[in-house]
Amino acid sequence: MSLYSAYETLSADELLALVQERDSADPEHDSDELWSAIGALARRADDAVVKAVEGWCCSDRPPLRRLGADVFGQMGCYEALPIDRVPALNRLRSLLHDPEASVRSSAAASFGHFPSDLWSPSDVIPFAEDSAEEVRFSVAFALGGTCCDRSDAAVQALLRLMEDPDDDVRDWATFGLGISDADSPLVRDALAKRLDDPRLDTRCEAIVGLARRHDERAASPILEGLGYDSVSSLMVEAAEAMPRRAFLEPLQAILESNPDDPSIEAAIAACQNA
């Protein structure tokens, strides 16, 4: 039985208690048990649950306020839930000003779970300058993808976050801008600058972002990356996004070690038709 299936048999009060118990037992706030319980509670989302979570957000205990933000954020993932999302988003806006960085971080990240047409990038952009790297990371998470597609301000914020001193912030900002449809010489140059990033994941995200925009600066890094002993799946993705006949030989060698891998097969097919 899956965790979700097990949680479905619990009453709302039992589920609320379980989420708090799981949170107390998880100092890192990242266990599957905790987030499965949070997701199950978010999917319950009846009036009693929403009222209880609202109470958490107003608690004098920072961990409970953070937990409230997390649950409201997960509610944003389920568009079919019969709830009014405006009060949840308004509460998250207030939590962005919380004195505790962990609460601000959860609030900022929660916006990224809601459809981007329900909130404005301007809600979180001011917190791209937050002193806490965990908050800046959450802002990068929230602003990536479709927010950039409709907001020049979101693009500008991610361009700044791509220069952040924190590795994780730069990585997620590069990913978020890379997967968006935002395209300009400024965007491409910013992605190209990250080709020299000290973090491998960030370099790979930059390569994919350039490849999606068919920028020739991605070609040599893709070919080089496909030749590594341990090839990132992002290099395969980049090869499919910007196919070249020159990528065929290394891709075929990778396929020999990973037979029937659909992503490698798709990249090979694209390169054969290039």
Image (cartoon, helix red, strand yellow):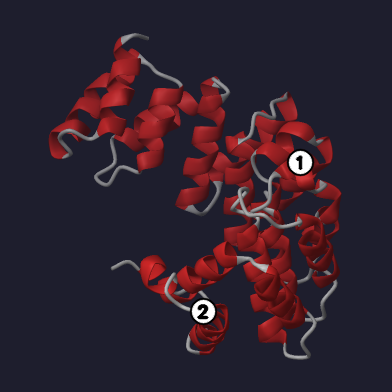
Quadrant in which residue 228 is drawn: top left
Quadrant in which residue 31 is drawn: bottom left
Spot occupied by residue 158 in the image (x, y as percentages of width and height)? 72, 46
Spot occupied by residue 181 in the image (x, y as percentages of width and height)? 65, 29
Residue 146 lies left or right of residue 154; in this view the side is: left
Amino acid under disc 2: Ser
Q: What residue does disc 1 label?
A: 117
Spot occupied by residue 243 in the image (x, y as percentages of width and height)? 40, 18
Q: Residue at x 55, y 33 (%)?
A: 209
Q: What residue does disc 2 label?
A: 11
Residue 51 lies left or right of residue 259; in this view the side is: right
Q: Residues within 10 Å of mark 1 (few under 14, many from 20)?
A: few
Q: Residues within 10 Å of mark 2 (few under 14, many from 20)?
A: few
Q: Is residue 208 above or below residue 28?
A: above
Q: Secondary structure at mark 2?
A: loop
Q: Quadrant of the C terminus?
A: top left
- Farthest residue to the top: give it: 273
